[in-house]
Amino acid sequence: MQSNVGLVIEEKAADIGNFMVGRLLPFRKKRAVGPFLFIDHMGPACLKEYQNLDVPPHPHIGLSTLTYLFEGSIFHRDSLGNAVEIKPGAVNWMTAGKGVVHSERTPEYLRDESKFLHGFQIWVGLPKALEQSEPSFYHIEKEALPTWEENGIQYKLIAGKIEGKSAPVPVHSPLFFIEIKTEAAQKIDIGDRLYGEVAMYVLEGSVRVEGNTYGTKQLLVAKKASLCAFETNEETTLYLFGGEPFDEERFMFWNFVNSDKAVLEQAKTDWKNQNVDAFPKVPGDEEEYVPLPEPRQYK
């Protein structure tokens, strides 16, 4: 029987400012899974009293960002005027559209003490018609996310829709982002609820797929979402990402995503020149910014 596991992506280290993350997407053999373009696994990290997360104001276009924490806290500020602390289980959903700027830092009340930080940073592409839309931001508390249990299996729908369930995160295309937890070994066949493409990330524990065992720090990409079936070990936490892919190719440079390279070139020029009409300042965090990186190549 032919395997449904089309690709196993090993988590690789990457830097975001003074913080190390495990980058899952993009990967040279797989640029996206459904509309998901970029997935970073932050931590787990224990930051001492003199260590803090400090990602100064930086721009985005043509995508939505999704932040989801397992541990710790991040204070988000953006050029729309939002200033929000995100804690574990909540969702920050920011749609950049034609352009937005934001910063992510350790909250002031935690900066002089030890703390943990662990979570996901995710980029989701926008449909072509919305790539130049007005930017927006939504914060969704953890209590608003759908959770349910089936035969000892705990589910949480963090974003998107699956059969009979819908999360309040205002996504722009058909997608799903699901947390699954088991305390005992379980057989799970969820393929009949999924659509498009799907990838699995095991945060804790391990899964067995078609006779092979996979653990943490790997992203499994399935050939067909409809064949998504697996077994977990006793205590396992995993995440399924996926949905319908776009018809058009998406180009990526740094924090910019678009189906038109000319739009990316203009964004690069605007950010390099600090054009505040294209990329306004972030209220309350106006002293710093992340410069345009070199070399200027597309991914």
Image (tube, grey):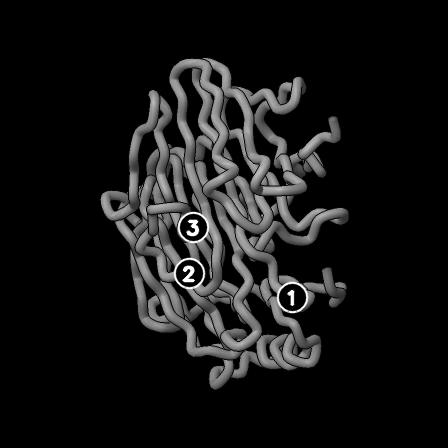
Q: In terms of secondary structure, where does tag 3 sit? A: strand
Q: Is residue 49 above or below residue 267?
A: above
Q: Amino acid at mark 3?
A: Thr
State the image coordinates of residue 201 (x, y, percent, origin top left): 55, 34
For label 1, the crowd category at 10 Å Cα-Cα, with few meaning under 14, some 14 to 19 and many 20 or more, is few
Residue flagged by tag 1: what amino acid is it?
A: Asp
Q: Which residue is mark 2?
A: 171
Separation of residues labelled 1 and 3 (CA atoms): 26 Å
Q: Secondary structure at mark 2?
A: loop
**Residue 190 location, x and y as percent?**
48, 34
Q: Which-is-in-front pick, marks 3 and 2? A: 2
Mark 2 crowdedness (10 Å alpha carbons): few <14, some 14-19, many ≥20: some
Q: Is residue 62 above or below residue 276?
A: above
Mark 3 and mark 2 lie on one chain; the one further toward the N terminus is 3
Determine which residue is flagged by label 3: 67
Q: Nearer the viewer, residue 36 or 254?
A: 36
Residue hosting label 1: 247
Q: Residue at x 63, y 32 (%)?
A: 218
Please provide percent x and percent y for residue 16: 57, 49
Query: Given contact means CB atoms under 8 Å apart, are the residues at marks 1 and 3 in contact?
Result: no
Tell me what residue is drawn at x 66 percent, y 64 percent: 252
Q: Secondary structure at mark 1?
A: loop
